[in-house]
Image (cartoon, rainbow, N blue to C red):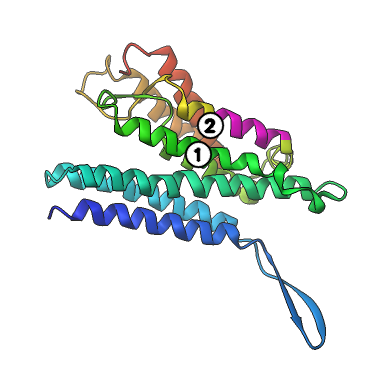
Amino acid sequence: MKHIPNLFTLINLFFGCIAIIYILQNGIIIVSDEQGTQLIEIPEKLWMASLFIALAAVVDFLDGFAARLFNATSALGKELDSLADVVSFGVAPGLIVYQFLRLSFASQPNGIEIPVIWLMPALLIPCAAAYRLAKFNIDDSQQYGFKGVPTPAVGLLIASFPLIYWYSQSAEAVSLMQNKWLWYAIILLVSYLMVSNLPLMALKFKNFSVKSNLPKLILLLAAIIAAIFLKWLAVPVVFILYIILSLAFKNKTT
């Protein structure tokens, strides 16, 4: 029984790796043969990465639940969980932003020929995620409140962007996501939020008091309403609301 939580953690890592595979399938394969060079187009599957990051988040929740259920917490499990989270909620989301930066530049004249250095800032996201997880592992005070945004929250935020881009009914949102400056701003924002010491609430309930859990209940209600009316756009809206509520009720979130 003691290895069941670690099995969930490895499934988290497995899903994160699958997400990366889909991210790296950029839609065009170049084939050379005796007849010359051919460009074979295949459908973009970046949105599939969103699915597997979401599945990784579900499994990440289950490994903690299983560890408490079977009283199987361990130092190994804690370190393994962080290693898996770096891949699923750090590397994979960073590569999604990398691909969106490519898309943003490709929509400009000669954008395909840009130096790769303009895309490198996307890799700040996995670096910030690794730093945040290492800091979390040596801090035992973050049970009912976080210092900085948890990496799974950032991973799910970024995972929503391909779904918004391909399936949103908002032409304005789709157009905005072709702007490279938006992506640079997102990189800086989420990287800062992960490594910062901002007091943010953990979505755990100490008790069933409405007063002490008010920000969590507001967030839950807002998430349901936003999902109904905004579809995938609800994810960034709820993320922003999470930050605002955490700071507004900071005395209740730690």
Q: Are marks 2 and 1 in contact (CB under 8 Å)?
A: yes
Relative to 14, residue 180 above or below: above
In percent of width and height, residue 87 lies at 44, 49
Relative to 36, residue 50 above or below: above
Relative to 241, residue 31 above or below: below
As shown in the figure, which amino acid type bears the numbered disc 2?
Ser
Which residue corresponds to mark 2? 191
Q: Can residue 78 be seen from the camera position used here?
A: yes
Q: Is residue 99 left or right of residue 104?
A: left
- Tell me if mark 2 has few (under 14), some (14-19) or many (20+) residues whose alpha carbon lies within 10 angstroms of its own: many
Q: Is residue 20 left or right of residue 197?
A: right
As shown in the figure, which amino acid type bears the numbered disc 1?
Cys
Secondary structure, magenta segment, majority class: helix
Q: Which residues are magenta?
A: 181-190
Relative to 106, residue 149 above or below: above
Q: What residue sits 21% from the left and 24% below the top?
A: 206
- Tell me if mark 1 has few (under 14), some (14-19) or many (20+) residues whose alpha carbon lies within 10 angstroms of its own: some
List the single residue furthest toward the bottom. Answer: 34
- The answer to whether residue 85 is magenta is no
User: Which labelled disc corresponds to residue 127?
Assistant: 1
Q: Nearer the viewer, residue 43 or 124?
A: 124
Q: Nearer the viewer, mark 2 or mark 1?
A: 1
In percent of width and height, residue 186 lies at 61, 33
Determine which quarter of the picture holds residue 13. bottom left
